[in-house]
Amino acid sequence: MRNGTPKVAAFRRTLAMLDAVLADGGQSGIAAIARGIGMPVATAHRQVATLVEEGYLARDAARRHIAGPRLIGMLHRLDEKQIVAACAAPVLHRLAAESGTVVQLGTFENDMVTYRVKTGQGAGALFSRVGMQLEAYCSGIGKVLLANLPDDHRRAYLATGPFPALTARTITDPDAIADELERVRAQGFAFDAQEVADGLVCAAVPVMWPDGRVLAAISSSQFGEQVRPPEELLPALSAAARDIERTAFGG
Amino acid sequence: MRNGTPKVAAFRRTLAMLDAVLADGGQSGIAAIARGIGMPVATAHRQVATLVEEGYLARDAARRHIAGPRLIGMLHRLDEKQIVAACAAPVLHRLAAESGTVVQLGTFENDMVTYRVKTGQGAGALFSRVGMQLEAYCSGIGKVLLANLPDDHRRAYLATGPFPALTARTITDPDAIADELERVRAQGFAFDAQEVADGLVCAAVPVMWPDGRVLAAISSSQFGEQVRPPEELLPALSAAARDIERTAFGG
DNA sequence: TCCCGTTTCTCATATAGTGAGACACTAGGC
DNA sequence: GCCTAGTGTCTCACTATATGAGAAACGGGA
């Protein structure tokens, strides 16, 4: 969408109407809805009737309207991790541009980290690609995700070793990893100090879903001789995480 | 909606497009979407662009489309209990017609049962109204809902007595109620044998949300001298509960 | 560099939504 | 039991507006 593409007003109206009806959770009859958005009753009626017929809204015996089965079905099908990734992308682009680091977002599946968003320039960009799956125990994002797993799940993961060393600094002992994860969870962020690749350092923080689960983690990485200490990246990174949470939730 | 109201095709198209894009969870670019539903690319582009601009869809760097923040916002605004009630209404009407009993759906709020749907003819219809809140410990619906509460919540409820007797058969002793609830949970249904009103008997079963929580209960009640034994109502009642669950979830 | 698939844009045409107003229910007051 | 007020439903002439063919800009991959 470069710009100036004419938009489909009917689509806006559809969603606006859905929003309006859902907004007051089943309090409204047609007349109230119409009044609420300043629209002729006849029009509101026709539109709502359509949504009801299609099953996106439901109407009870007292002619009041709430979410219908189709809407529920649709919303239950949503993949929360994709949503977070989608909402995160613009925030991460900005962070990468402002910090001059490589910024990524990853989620946890099948004991591996899936990298879903990646942005920013620099040599640090060489070590991963979008869609790639990497081991979790050594990267910043991986540590954050592991640290926020349910206890039994994390214990099970730690029992799946051995954990190969990728550099001289990789933590490979399960107990040492467990300690590190405990620390990460307590402090709310993780560092990777050349544990994945020599010269690559990063800081990572969790992104939380409104219900408190950690669905993703974001990291800011640098590579080479001249890097800022990762602590310096934390404030911007945390701010970005808050931004993402706000976008993904509030709309 | 009696019938024949002209419907707004644009609304259908809007939701159809949303559905189509969500269906393949972020795999699709514009061209693929257009092909998938047999629509000119130009049109698909305009429509999707609108949804993206409004925030209902999001587009990643690779031009692939998934759910956007507004859609998430919607998801979080849904009142699950209302949804269940809405989806249940038609099923319950049918059940009432076929069984000749009074059928109701209730949910649990603030230690009381809220009656959200009520249908069917007969004297049994005298004892409640939609929107009414009644004590939980004595009715069939109330027992089912209490029995499926988290343990600590149920214990807290049982400590709130005393529980007044509404008829000679009302169970009023907290320990006896606890036993009854244990039985109800184990067997998956409850009876009310004239414990709320003399001559009123009912059977009740839980309605489950897809995540396993019991959000509502439905009951089938009869009143008077000539009533069928409540056990006979159970098969139809359970079938209705399954129906409701299917509607409320699958769409 | 030249492709090919994809995305974006333009514009004449016809489809399809709008809203005023009339009519039909329903509930509640008297 | 009748009336009234508040809703919900329907009809129809008017026009706003979505459509889709085609062409132009991208943008990777060979």
Image: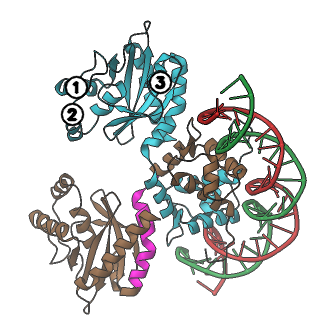
Chain colours: A brown, B cyan, C red, D green
**Relative to residue B223, is residue D9 depicted above or below?**
below
- Quadrant of the image occupied by residue A189: bottom left
Residue B103: mark in rendering: 3
The answer as to whether the residues below labels 1 and 2 share one chain is: yes
Residue A223 horizontal/vertical position (percent) = 29, 86
**Residue under pointer 1:** B177
Principal secondary structure, stretch drawn in magenta: helix
- Quadrant of the image occupied by residue B137: top left
Instruction: Verify CB contact (< 8 Å) between mark 3 and mark 2.
Output: no
Residue B158: mark in rendering: 2
Q: Give the residue type that dot 1 points to.
A: Ile
Query: Crowdedness of circle 2 by 10 Å Cα count: few (<14), some, many (20+)?
Result: some
Camera-side mark, 3 or 2: 2
Quadrant in which the N terminus of chain B appears: top right
Secondary element at tag 1: helix
Residue A225: mark in rendering: none
Instruction: Verify CB contact (< 8 Å) between mark 1 and mark 2.
Output: yes
In the visual, does B88 lie left or right of A119? right
Q: Chain of mark 1?
A: B
- Magenta stretch? A77-97
Q: Give the residue type that dot 2 points to.
A: Leu
Q: Chain of mark 2?
A: B
